[in-house]
Amino acid sequence: MEEPASPYVHYYNRGVNKEIIFFTSDNYLLLIRKLTEYIKEYQIELIAFCLMPNHYHILLKHENQNDGSKLIQRLFNSYTQAINKRYSRVGTLFQGNVKKRFIEDDDYLAETIKYIHLNPVKAGLCDKPENWEYSDYREWIGLDETIRNISVERDNIFGSTKDYEELINFEYQKF
């Protein structure tokens, strides 16, 4: 079966048996560092991400589907090896193969980005998405500097930084 031609792909997975995959703050930061390094190497655009204690969401934009899959495979193989070494564990950290969804239209793209950024609030890990350190929401609303070109995607989909922040604030009040 042929994969869709969409350049936007939402990758996600969780820990085996729904177990924790990030044990300390350093684990989250290690994965973020590796992700930042690999997107440059593969010349792939990172649109949004959120790392949760037992799962992750990463939204990439890339023309070549093989490059995105290779990046994700390399990223999480490397992460698993580092975690296994650090904690003297063996075996898999993740539940099966990474899942991916192709984003075919702007409405679904907008919903996916909001879903990723609201995930820690919905899970009860923080009261506002800007309080979760392991997501790029703070970059999306201009609280952290970014080396990525988030503003192009954000402005095309949601309007200004303030527009996106107000939309997210409205959304998380529903929880």
Image: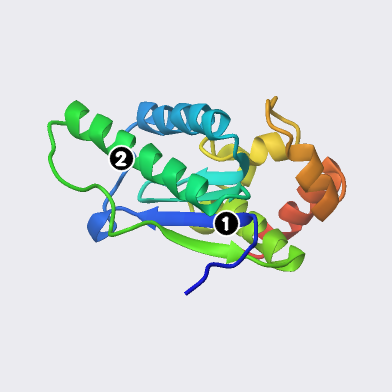
Q: Is residue 57 left or right of residue 141?
A: left
Asked if residue 68 is positioned above or below residue 88 in the image, the reply reads: below
Q: CA distance from mark 1 to mark 2?
A: 19 Å
Mark 2 crowdedness (10 Å alpha carbons): few <14, some 14-19, many ≥20: some
Question: Residue 77, which numbered label?
Answer: 2
Q: Is residue 25 left or right of residue 158?
A: left
Question: Residue 9, which numbered label?
Answer: 1
- The percent position of residue 24, horizontal first and vertical second, equals 33, 32
Say what amino acid the circle numbered 1 marks: Val
Which residue does the image show at 58% across and 64% down from the upper left? 102
The kind of secondary structure element at disc 2 is helix
Mark 1 crowdedness (10 Å alpha carbons): few <14, some 14-19, many ≥20: many
Q: Quadrant where the C terminus lies?
A: bottom right
Say what amino acid the circle numbered 2 marks: Asn
The kind of secondary structure element at disc 1 is strand
Q: Is residue 35 left or right of residue 47?
A: left
